[in-house]
Amino acid sequence: MSFKSISIFIFFFIISCKENSVKNQNNYHIQINEDIPERIVTDEMLNEIEHFFKDVSNVEIYAYFNRTHWKHEDSEDFRTFKNFKNGKVFIEEVYIRNKITLSIEQINKLKDSFKEGYRDGATLACYNPRHLIVFYDNKNDIKGYIEVCFECSNLDYSENTASFANSIFHMKSLLKEFGITYFEETDNESPGMYLKKNNQNE
């Protein structure tokens, strides 16, 4: 190989490396020009996760029928989860498909999973939420929540989970491991099923 050929090879190798990875000023590494980019993890995010979970004593996970198809009086604003009553989550039993309470070991596993970061990608305009994670503090008061639509890669969350809420998108398998089995409507469910029943009873 000639000296000229070697020089050209080295030049394109350096350019390729620069195109494939970028070091962000906020101290996280982003992999670009790849089918599956590297997850984003910042020191600030890790610190906020530790601070948030410091007094988390209980975590509940709900799986429910697509909230956009609930009766209007049961979910007046489908883009924001507002089903809290007297400091507790209030969801009509008819919508709930799974509800689990995590053990201390599972809470720690959830925290570690949040620390794995998130991939910065596109979301769809739709929002069909079916899953909710609720965090309780040492006084058993609601500390925060994250509601997620895995279908559209969209979510709703309390302000104190904003820095790490996006990490939920890689946790579908973890939720299954914890015991969540419901991720889409079954054959005997339809979007207007509860509305039709309501109308029939009037």
Image: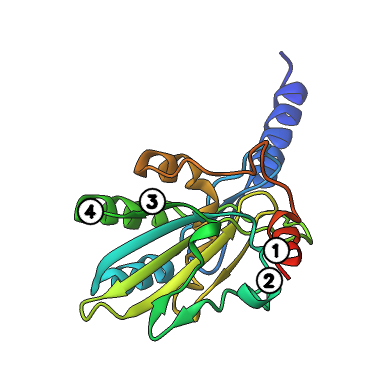
Q: Tag 3 or tag 2, which sits nearer the N-term?
A: 2
Q: Residues within 10 Å of mark 4 (few under 14, many from 20)?
A: some
Query: Does residue 40 appear in this view?
Result: no
Q: For the residue marked with disc 4, what is the amino acid?
A: Ser
The residue identified by callout 1 is: 68
Quadrant location of the N terminus in the rendered image: top right
Q: Nearer the viewer, mark 2 or mark 3?
A: 2
The image position of residue 102, as x and y in percent, is: 28, 54
User: Horizontal and vertical percent for residue 44?
Assistant: 41, 71
Residue identifier under label 3? 113
Q: Which residue is mark 4?
A: 103
The residue at the point 77 percent across, 25 percent down is: 4
Q: Earlier in the sequence, mark 4 or mark 2?
A: 2
- For disc 2, the marked residue is 78
Mark 4 vs mark 3, CA separation in Å: 15 Å
Asked if marks 2 and 1 touch (Cβ < 8 Å), the reply is: yes
Tag 2's secondary structure?
loop
Could you tell me how far apart the alpha carbons at marks 4 and 1 are, in whole angstroms? 30 Å
Choose between 152 and 76: the one closer to the eye. Answer: 76
Q: Nearer the viewer, residue 14 or 201?
A: 201
Residue 124 appears left or right of 128: right
Q: Total marks drawn? A: 4
Q: Amino acid at mark 3?
A: Ser
Task: Decide if residue 33 is on the left or right side of residue 21.
Answer: right
Mark 2 closeness class: few <14, some 14–19, many ≥20 residues within 10 Å:
some
Single out the mark in the foreground, 1 or 3: 1
Q: CA distance from mark 1 to mark 3?
A: 28 Å
**Residue extending furthest bottom?**
86
Question: Disc 1, disc 3: CB below 8 Å?
Answer: no
